[in-house]
Image: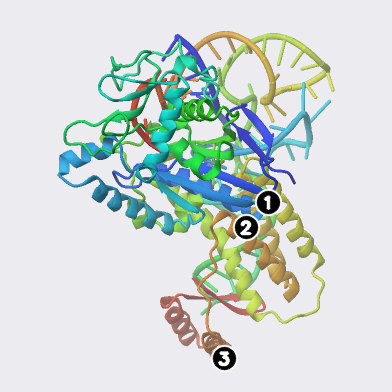
Amino acid sequence: MPIRVYNTLTRKKEEFVPLHANRVSMFVCGLTPQDETHMGHAKTYVAFDVVARFLRHKGYHLFYLQNVTDIEDRIIEKMQKTGRGWKDIVNQYFGEYLEVMDALRCDSVDVYAFATDYIDDIVEQIQGLIQKGHGYVAEDGSVYYDTTTFSGWGKLSGQKVESLRPGARIAIEERKRHPADFVLWRAQKPGEPGWDSPWGKGRPGWHIEDTAITIRHFGPQYDLHGGATELMFPHHESEIAQAEAYTGITPFVKYWIHGGMVTVKGEEMHKSLGNYWPVKAALKLYEPEVIRFFLINVQYRGPIDFAPELLEEAKRSYERLRETTRTVEAERRRAADTGKADHSLMVATTKALADFDAAMSDDFNTREAIAVIFEYGRVVNKALETGVGRGALDDAARAYQTFGDVLGILEPAAGGADLVEGLLDLIVALREDARKRKDFATADRIRDALAAVGIVLEDTRDGVRWKRK
RNA sequence: GCCGGGGUGACAGAGCGGCUAAUGUGACCGACUGCAGAUCGGUUUCCAGAGGGUUCGACUCCCUCCCCCGGCACCA
């Protein structure tokens, strides 16, 4: 099934056709490591991790590049407040970000590109823009992009230069020729870090690092650019202006994809609002897979209004999902190959895989894909009640493996040594003897003791099965 | 004001021009059961923000209005 992607540039779902056959280049705006990684970050990066996983699952050779803005106003602010070096601050928070990503099983990024490692590319690109008449140098040594020189301005966000009014956040800079102009290179101020450039010491503007990094790695065009919707304007708009003016090649990016925001009680998450949820705080309450499940339980373009109660609901929901996979594991351990055809379960498995693929192919609709897994789970559970042969169980296990791999959930329980399995079979058999004697005290004692070490016993119509918790 | 995205059953949240609107959570009933757990079946909700239009038929398309979210120049 062809993949369809909602492209912000065209405002509709388009069939996904990479620029170069099977090769896909994807860039996602990374973060500025200057504070704790919060649930908003997690939503964005989990969403694009799933995109990457699915594209790879579909056989594309994907290269996933993410930048790290390691020099920026807020980092400098933090420097000045704490007296620490910028790199020190970046290392701390980026390190923490990696820990969080690791916990959430976001492992699909190939390269993290730090802005300050690309100063040469950035300078070269700014020089090119000046030469082509798209940039101008202000008296203080800053360089600005002249937005009036780029006819494609606003094509991503639908904004028009004329209709913009200054936002409340920042005053118009008087050095700009036009209020819509933006900084390519920011002249150094006393006490700030700076890099050499033809215009004196300074640092890159916010937007230029992304085009410098992607042009270095991907060239003048690439397939997918992701980011949260808040970055659509002005950041992504500016990227287009820079890259297309610099290279003369259009479109800079074939598909722009934007993810929805995390809000809290309808407000954007902000430290100043006191509603800031660092991922680490959430990880203290719920296991990583639950948080990941929670984040992909909506279509990526939609927002999530965060509340701890919703994590609780996600936990219950997710446990139901995972429970079925554990049951399949348990039944596989004790199912002999009966040679039974189990045709209906096999058909259901095939259908579930196809439906899952269709859901994911429709603009990475994880919500729909999860619904498919639940529906399939009911069929599996029903089949399990009546008994299933080994072949159909293996089939089901493989399907769950696929679902889990693509979504980054349903990690198999830690594999056990033969010794453990042998001992458990023995213990279970002894407990069965006790139960037959109606010695329930002993039976319960065994079950409780096993539960304490993470082994759950379940009595079913046709015997006992054990699962790892 | 401008640009973008939304308003779906108790809650969360999908799809679709026509099958009583998926899936999950919650609640209730039942089955299974020594107990527990897991599971299964059923019930619970429906004039889909308001109004109008198109159509044989709209939750789905169009228009108007109301409300919410994001952006409006260094936020994932």
**Which color mode does the image show?**
rainbow
Front in this rendered view, residue B7 or A329:
A329
Per the rendering, the mark at residue A66 is: none
Q: Which of marks 1 and 3 is nearer the N terminus?
A: 1
Q: In this view, does A437 lie above or below A377?
A: below
The residue wearing badge 2 is: A403
Q: How far apart are marks 2 and 3 (CA)?
A: 39 Å
Q: Looking at the rendering, which quadrant does residue A466 occupy?
A: bottom right
Residue at screen point 60% across, 75% down: A330
- 10 Å crowding of disc 1: few (<14), some (14-19), many (20+): many
> Is A428 situated above or below A57?
below
Q: Position of residue A387 (x, y in %)?
A: 72, 73
Q: In which quarter of the image is residue A430?
A: bottom right
What amino acid type should be assigned to the residue bearing mark 3? Answer: Asp
2 or 3: mark nearer the eye = 2
Task: Point out residue A431 in the picture as x, y percentages from the top left corner.
Answer: 53, 87
Mark nearest the camera among 1 and 3 is 1
